[in-house]
Amino acid sequence: MSSKAGATGGGAGAGAPALRRDPYEVLGVSKESSDQEIKTAYRKLALKYHPDKNASNPEAAELFKEVAFAYGILSDPGKRRQYDVEGFEAVDAESMEVDLSNLGTVNTMFAALFSKLGVPIKTTVSANVLEEALNDTMTINPLPIGTSFSGKVDKQAAHFFSVSITEEQAEAGIVVRVTSQSKFKLLYFERDASGYGLALQEDSEKTGKVTSAGMYFLHFQVYRLDTTVSALAIAKDPEAAFFKRLDGLQPCEVAELKAGVHIFAVYGDNFFKPATYTIEALCAKAYQETTVRLKEIEAQILQKRNELRQFETEYRKALAHFQEVTNRYNQEKQSVDELLKQRDSIHSTFSVLRLPSDASKGSTSKVPPEESRSESPGDDGSSEGKDKSAKKKWPFNLGLKGSDSNKRMA
């Protein structure tokens, strides 16, 4: 589902500076400040220090990261509670967001390459788009419920849409989905006293041959899967790829919309080219069975995440034991092979015969010289020796006349 966002949609995505200040101090709010007060303070500071407006000011870029990091903690109820109790050690500051409009050509090419290779790179929404919304100067196209619209949005630009919802439709639930062949963001804006501010954003994900993103306001908890969270965990521990797959499951902070007019936008998030897209707004009343099924699946996925965390402990214990017995197996096999080899070597020493391997090495035979000569007629090279050697082919002395044997006997 959608990730909660402020003016940049950055939230917890920005990296923390080396020297971190108290998030409340950074945003100029108190621990008693409401969510809306924190959001308003963040929007003002994020626009003030946004890289688009401070291209030649590295100090502003660091302040922008600090503001985004602080908002990432205070905008998340869970992280805010953790920080209030345990401080920075309790919150995660691993992921990083970049502003494509401020990267430059070379850095954009590198970022595009890493993204193509599957490295998760989170991007911020352009300050120009945010200021358009804040100042209410954007062009808005109506998107009636039950219809779709197709268009092409430039990189780091946005197309805005207004979706009018009746009481009945709001009660039934609303779904807004976008499909494309390229990277994009689906944005949702809320209006306050200062203008429209970015409240939710959903980064497109590859699903089959297309990319898609959706926001589901169905009166029950819906989750989004932030793949950058699992990717960072997997980078630290490749063996954890399966177990960390659901770690990026995050609840959407907005589960329903009230009757009235709501503003959505499709933001071009491609590194080089425009994104062709189709956006549609639907009432869940016509999809009651599908809605019930989604609710069941969301609950099952959440339960599965909890089960995997328990199973990972069991798996790692079993894996450690397996590695231990595998190592012993290899050691025992090597030991048995060595013992059998030594036994064969000992067996081979019980012999008076010249072994071919010994003869090839020029070793001295243990057979006595006399016995050797008697068994090897023809070693002296004489013709008599050759004849005796030939006679050994016959098993019996047949006593034939004229034979050398008879002559010697005579």
Image (cartoon, grey):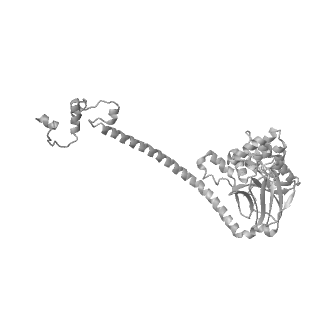
Report x, y in % for residue 377: 23, 33
Which residue extends farthest front?
A: 402
Number of residue marks:
0
**Which quarter of the rendered picture does the N terminus lie within?**
bottom right
**Which quarter of the rendered picture does the C terminus lie within?**
top left
* Residue at x-position 67% and y-position 47%: 117
Report x, y in % for residue 19: 74, 39
Which is nearer the eye, 410 or 301? Answer: 410
Report x, y in % for residue 300: 63, 62
380 over 164 or under it: above or below: above
Which is nearer the eye, 368 or 265? Answer: 368
383 over 2 or under it: above or below: above
409 over 158 or under it: above or below: above
Which is nearer the eye, 167 or 109? Answer: 109
Report x, y in % for residue 233: 64, 48
**One can see residue 375 in this view:** no
* Residue at x-position 78% and y-position 42%: 105
* Residue at x-position 83% and y-position 56%: 159
Which residue extends farthest left?
A: 410
**One can see residue 267 in this view:** yes
State left or right for residue 215 relative to residue 341: right
